[in-house]
C-alpha cells in the first residue's frame, strides 16, 4: 500500500510511561507505507480516524484511553495489507496497544525520528 509518488520511511512505535520514559519500542523498515493513513481520515472517511494522525513529519502520541479505537483500526488495516511480515508487524503493534491499555499512565508514540521523539507532537485527546 505505498503512497503514490511518495517514499516510505520507518515509523518507530514507543510505549512510554507517564514521564514519557521509554518502556519498549518496535519498528519495521518502510512501515510508513501502510501505517500512514492520512487519505482515509482527511477525505471524509472515518475508518482510520486515529491512524490518520500519523505522518512522516512529527511524533504522534496516543493516550491509553485511545487504545480500543486504535486497536480496531489496526485490525481493519491488517485485513488490507500484505506481505505476511507487514501483518506480523501490525500484530506486534496491536499487542503493544493492548499492553498500553492495561498499564495505567502509559501512552504510545508513533514517530518517524527513531531515537529522538522530542516534546513537539500532536496529542490525541478525548
Image (cartoon, rainbow, N blue to C red):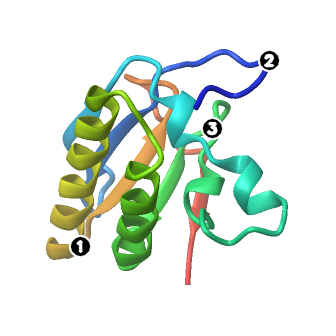
Q: Secondary structure at mark 1?
A: helix
- Circle nearer the N terminus (1, 3): 3
The location of residue 105, given as percent across then percent down, is: 25, 71
Front residue of 27 and 116: 27
Q: Which mark is on residue 58?
A: 3
The location of residue 52, given as percent across then percent down, is: 64, 55
Quick one: label 1, few (<14), some, or many (20+) residues within 10 Å? many
Residue 118 visible somewhere in the drawing: no
The location of residue 97, given as percent across then percent down, is: 27, 60
Label 1 sits on residue:
101
Quick one: label 3, few (<14), some, or many (20+) residues within 10 Å? some
Give the number of the mark in front: 2 or 3: 2
Q: Would you place residue 57 above or below residue 79 in this image?
A: above
- Circle nearer the N terminus (2, 3): 2
Residues tagged 2 and 1 counted as in contact (Cβ below 8 A): no
Q: Would you place residue 41 above or below residue 111 in this image?
A: below
Judge from the rendering whether residue 88 lies leftward or rightward of residue 38; answer left or right: left
Residues tagged 2 and 3 counted as in contact (Cβ below 8 A): no
Judge from the rendering whether residue 93 lies leftward or rightward of residue 10; answer left or right: left
Q: How far apart are the two marked residues, 2 and 3, measured between alpha carbons?
A: 20 Å
Q: Would you place residue 106 above or below residue 34 in this image?
A: below
Label 2 sits on residue:
5
Q: How far apart are the two marked residues, 2 and 1, measured between alpha carbons?
A: 36 Å
**In this figure, what is the number of numbered marks?**
3
- Circle nearer the N terminus (2, 1): 2
Q: Secondary structure at mark 2?
A: loop
Amino acid at each position: 500500500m505505498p503512497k503514490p509518488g511518495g517514499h516510505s520511511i520507518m515509523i518507530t512505535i514507543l510505549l512510554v510511561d507517564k514521564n514519557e520514559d521509554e518502556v519498549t519500542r518496535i519498528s519495521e523498515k518502510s512501515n510508513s507505507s501502510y501505517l500512514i493513513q492520512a487519505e482515509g481520515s482527511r477525505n471524509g472517511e472515518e475508518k482510520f480516524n486515529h491512524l490518520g494522525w500519523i505522518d512522516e513529519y512529527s511524533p504522534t502520541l496516543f493516550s491509553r484511553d485511545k487504545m480500543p479505537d486504535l486497536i480496531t483500526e489496526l485490525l481493519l488495516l491488517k485485513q488490507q495489507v500484505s506481505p505476511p511480515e507487514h501483518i506480523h508487524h501490525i500484530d506486534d503493534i496491536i499487542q503493544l496497544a493492548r499492553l498500553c491499555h492495561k498499564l495505567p499512565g502509559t501512552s504510545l508514540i508513533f514517530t518517524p525520528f527513531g531515537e529522538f521523539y522530542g516534546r513537539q507532537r500532536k496529542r490525541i485527546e478525548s
